[in-house]
Image (cartoon, helix red, strand yellow):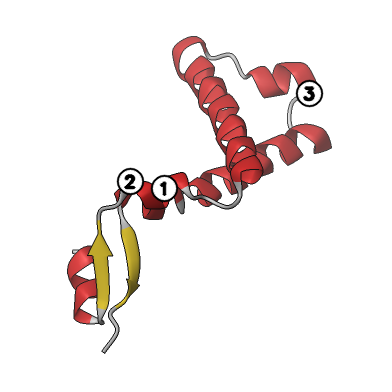
Amino acid sequence: MITEILRSRGYRLECSYERGKNMKNKGLDCLALTIAIIGAINWGLIGLFSFDLVAFVFGNMSWFSRIIYALVGIAGLYIITFYMYTGGETGKVDS
């Protein structure tokens, strides 16, 4: 559905692995992935064992644990942009 909307507005979608290899924010990308993986592990521990590692280490909803939760959320939102790199290139069609 999204691809049809983009194509109807004049965007072209190409599948290109080379585009993904040329990411410019490697450090930020790795940091976001690391934070998201830590968050995923924490959610896995919560789901499987009812154990919140962040709350255990930093306190239940302390200011520092809230910062950690916010960073995990921001990293997750940033990682959504990775679909541009893995799924192909999106750009306006030159007329």
**Residue 63, image x and y in percent?**
82, 38
Residue lying furthest bottom in this view?
Answer: 95
Please state, as top left, top right, bottom left or bottom right, where the N terminus lies in the image: bottom left
Please state, as top left, top right, bottom left or bottom right, where the C terminus lies in the image: bottom left
Give the residue displayed 61% in from the left and 50% down from the top.
25
**Which residue position holds label 2?**
17
Residue at disc 2, secondary structure: helix
Q: CA distance from mark 2 to mark 3?
A: 43 Å
Contact flag, marks 2 and 1 (Cβ < 8 Å): yes
Left or right of 9, for residue 71 = right
Residue at disc 3, secondary structure: loop
Front label number (3 vs 1): 1
> Foreground residue, 95 or 90?
95
Residue at disc 1, secondary structure: helix
Residue lying furthest right in this view?
Answer: 63
Give the residue displayed 48% in from the left and 19% down from the top.
44
Q: Quadrant of residue 33?
A: top right
**Residue 29, image x and y in percent?**
58, 43
Query: What label does residue 59 carry, if any?
Result: 3
Report whether residue 62 is seen.
Answer: no
**At label 3, which amino acid type do we have?**
Gly
Q: In the rendered structure, which disc, 2 or 3, sits on the residue that comes first in sequence?
A: 2
Q: Quadrant of residue 92?
A: bottom left
Contact flag, marks 2 and 3 (Cβ < 8 Å): no
> Foreground residue, 15 or 53?
15
**At label 2, which amino acid type do we have?**
Tyr
> Foreground residue, 5 or 13?
13
Instruction: Using the image, determine if residue 36 lies above or below residue 79.
Output: above
**At label 1, which amino acid type do we have?**
Gly
**Residue 91, image x and y in percent?**
35, 71
Q: Quadrant of residue 72?
A: top right
**Which residue position holds label 1?**
20
